[in-house]
Image: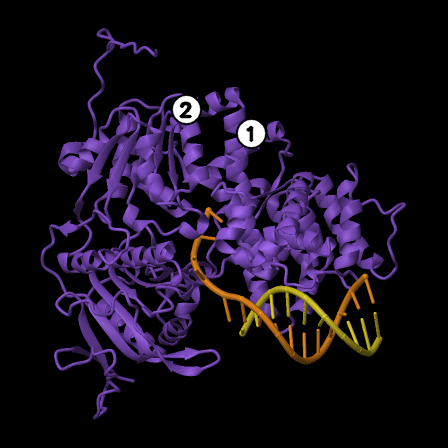
Chain colours: A purple, B orange, C yellow
Amino acid sequence: MARRFILKANKDKPAPKELTIDYASQLNEQQLAAVMAAGGPYLVIAGAGTGKTRTLVYRVAYLVETGVAPEQIILLTFTRRSANEMLTRASSILDGRCNRVRGGTFHAFCLTVLKEHAPLIGLPANFTILDASDDADVIDVLRTAKRYNKGASRFPRKGTLQSIYSASVNRELPVEEVLANQYPHFLGHMEAIQDLQIAYEEYKKQHGLVNFDDLLRYTVDLLSTNDTVRQRVSTSCRHLLVDEYQDTNRLQAELIYLLADVHRNVMVVGDDAQSIYRFRGADFRNIFAFPDQYPDAQILKLEQNYRSTQPILDVANYVIQRAKHKYDKHLFSTLKEGELPGLVAAPDERFESRFVSQMVLQLREEGIPLGRMAVLFRGSANSFDLEVELGERGIPYVKYGGMKLSEAAHVKDVLAYLRILENPKDAVAWNRVLQLLPGIGPKTAQDIVTWVTTDADDPFALENRPFSPRYIEALKALFGVLRPLLKEATSLTHEVEAIITYYEPLLKQKYFEDYPKRLQDLEHFIGLAENGSDRSSFLSSLALDPIELTALNAVAIDDDEAPLILSTIHSAKGLEFQTVFLIHALDGIIPSGYSLKEEESLDEELRLLYVAVTRAERNLFISYPVLQYRRHHGEVLSKPSRFVDNVPQHLLEPWSLIEEHAESQPDSDAKTGKTDNSSDEAFLPF
DNA sequence: TTTCCCAAGCTTTTT
DNA sequence: GCTTGGGAAA
């Protein structure tokens, strides 16, 4: 029988200093309860726009003010962007005292733990982090080596294998089950897939390679098997704050549990109606399992929405109640009045883009800054047409969720050289670098990688090596650049410059059509390296927090005014905007065509739409093109998203677009039944 | 073994 | 449209 011992307050202790922040006046009752909560486990259920971020920010400040050492507070979030934002806000309300609070993604946190304890789990301290495509490349090398690609029936491709293994780690399920659930057509290859996985795990360990999943998994392994380390790490995080708990997967929930081992001061915040990472193993049921995991957990709720007007919330409420799995949510706002959200039927994609750009300009005229408006969409390709239009009209924008700088082939090439310097056993990097040389293909690269990564003293030794004259000069040139950089400690900037000087001719040869554009990216890259501290953290931060390619260009275009935001719905999570445009609201896009088979994934698409709608504060436009271009079919009549179709007109007002000077109305398609005389109209001058 | 060319297949969301 | 796999020439 466990006993409880009550520690009495120390009467002699000086009274706590007065709090600098007047919490009661800045927070509502529910928020205040969460902010001033004592230690122990808490589950905070917070609907969209109810001040979740605000609550976390004040909680951090409150803890610091009441004497918790800032570095013992850990704020775990989903993106580095939101962690930074929260910590900046906390620091600003508390005159910088929150500066040393630790915050970041699960992955980044795990990285710091692993860097410190790498040897304990058989990893070299200079291990490299693989992004998803590097990870797939490792798998591909082994897949080819084992000749699985030669079989009679189709074997999964590298990317598919990567997803299979990743799902198995994140959901803590055997590969067998992942195959049965998601890839039944590959069940015939089960043994080969399992065998390949063993080889793959072995290969990664041998070459000091760690993928995103490994960061989580190794940390959980380390903390659950090593009591000393667990207690030490847990003690160093006296207060755990976890944002977006509905998007954690089993592994992450387990990690939190281990981190809270010593003190159980863990506050998780989330909204089950906003869970949108099922594809990555997230399970919104985690949030309901929390009280089972922590039987003494207290449940707090934030219910009042401060973000949006009631008409916007009415649409959100209407939408979410269509879910098969019902949510106990009904958002209400203090802002009763507001514009009715619009459902814009554009004749085609061009019209939709013109509508958005014109409306953006009009609203800017009315005084709304560009940076307070956002265009959201399901997949990053959905905004291509709009991007062209914005470019033509000279409207600056940043796009989140598109191509990342570090995903561009030429940047990956340069990163590969750096990775070799960091970890000379990094076989993926070697492979990439070697295959850039004329005369070296997959086979030769493999052979060279073997001898280069097994020689402990000097990877660049050529004596007794079975090289061929076909490529030896090129190889010597490569080694000639890398060897001095590896031997002598120089600055990161110098390394990057030396590498780019060497790489430039190769770049010119490989991409002669658009090589100046790529060279420009590399110039940006040098700039980043100049700001980066050391090579190791530069590489890992690029892997864990890749830089949006358009962000760099947008800064170049205009640095006076914050640009318009273009973002996938996923990347817009947790953010809010004065005006939101949701474009391409089509059946097959949102909900995505892939989700139609399963009720559960269909629900997730619905939650995604819910997230998009609840980003808006004042104006919301949902638009879709009536004619859609489809690759093999040409122009096709599309179906508006089933989620917004048939929303009563008093909630979502139909708009139609009329060409200026045109006599006749554009084809109002009878099937949609939307364009009638009561519709609002927007004019599109040329 | 590399490299070049052509056909076929796939194509969401992210750390 | 872009990657991947196969086949053939160098």
**In the image, what residue type sits under mark 2?**
Asp
Q: Residue at x 44, y 68 (%)?
A: A381
Residue at (22, 88) in percent of width and height = A665
Amino acid of disc 1: Glu
Give whichever of A577, A197 is nearer the camera: A197
Would residue A675 appear left or right of A640 to someone viewing this image? left
Mark 1–mark 2 contact, CB under 8 Å? no
At numbered mark 2, what does the secondary structure look like: helix, strand or loop? loop
Residue on which the image places disc 2: A261
| Subunit under mark 2 | A
Q: Which corner quadrant of the image does residue A5 belong to?
A: top left
Residue A435 occupies quadrant: bottom right
Residue A242, disc: none
Left or right: where does residue A201 sit relative to residue A342? Answer: right
Name the spot of residue B6 as percent of width and height, x first: 68, 80
Mark 1 or 2 closer to N-term? 1
User: Which residue is situated farthest in the right direction here?
Assistant: A464
- Determine the image quadrant of residue A252: top left
**Residue highlighted by disc 1:** A116
